[in-house]
Image (cartoon, rainbow, N blue to C red):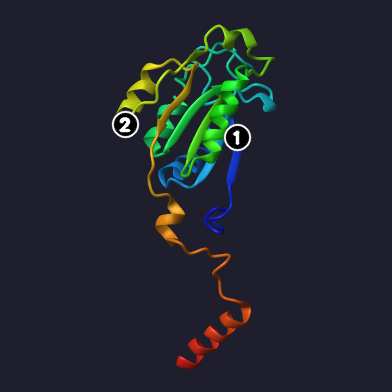
Amino acid sequence: MKIANPELKVITFSGDGNGLGEGLAHALFAAKRNQDMTLILHDNSVNALTTGQFSPLSETGWKGPSTPEGSIEKPFNAVSLLIEAGATFVARAFSGELTHLISILIEAIKYEGFSFLEILQSAVPYHSWEEYREKVAFQKTIPKSKEEALITANKAHRYVIGIFYQAREAFYHEKLYGKFNPVKNSLSRTQRLEKLREILKEK
């Protein structure tokens, strides 16, 4: 949608099972290309709507319907993964800290470039609110470089919330089109037919 009409404000929502599981390639390539859009990832660390299978963000040892003995997999670090992929705004928030969440959500949506916001939230049948509240901590400063952001993201535990990375780079449609807008600047039907007639005459 953004490539078709660069003037659109594109916001997409996904769970951790979809966004970093079956939809992983879409998320990584949108970040790699710095598409001017916002991806909001609802992270409850479980495929909650499909009866509780473990997700790419489930912690090692987590016991659920698909892993009764505990998950043997190491979870992704969503923040460092998206920074490494090329996202130019990466943050994490918690649905139990509404004022903080709203402020970061506004920043993510206003941001020009690919912004990624991971929102920690509880799927109550599988994780309790207390499990989050006891561990949530605030990221106090925004790292100044990609290298510092990656070090910070990898050192921080998964309940640290805040902005981990923010940088200005040219985004995809800007590099692809410049100021051109395929919707506003496209040829009319009459003009397209005339162009076809010219091409056919030349042949």
Residue 94 visible here: no
Residue occupying image coordinates x 55% and y 13%: 62
Q: Mark 2 or mark 1, which is nearer the start of the sequence?
A: 1
Q: Secondary structure at mark 2?
A: loop
Q: Quadrant of the N terminus?
A: bottom right
Residue 17 visible here: yes
* Front-most of residues 176 and 103: 103
Q: Quadrant of the C terminus?
A: bottom left
Q: Residues within 10 Å of mark 2 (few under 14, many from 20)?
A: few
Q: Residues within 10 Å of mark 1 (few under 14, many from 20)?
A: some
Q: Secondary structure at mark 1?
A: strand
Query: Residue 2, position in %: x, y?
Result: 54, 53
Residue occupying image coordinates x 40% and y 56%: 175
Residue placed under numbered mark 2 in the picture: 145
Label 1 – label 2 distance at C-alpha: 27 Å
* Front-most of residues 172 and 51: 172
Amino acid identity at mark 1: Ser
The picture quadrant where one finds residue 192 is: bottom right
Amino acid identity at mark 2: Ser
* Front-most of residues 41 and 63: 41
Query: Residue 67, position in %: x, y?
Result: 57, 16
Query: Residue 190, position in %: x, y?
Result: 62, 82
Residue placed under numbered mark 1 in the picture: 14
Residue occupying image coordinates x 58% and y 24%: 101
Foreground mark, 1 or 2?
2
The picture quadrant where one finds residue 66 is: top right
Residue occupying image coordinates x 43% and y 34%: 82
Relative to 6, is 137 above or below?
Answer: above
Query: Residue 156, position in %: x, y?
Result: 40, 16
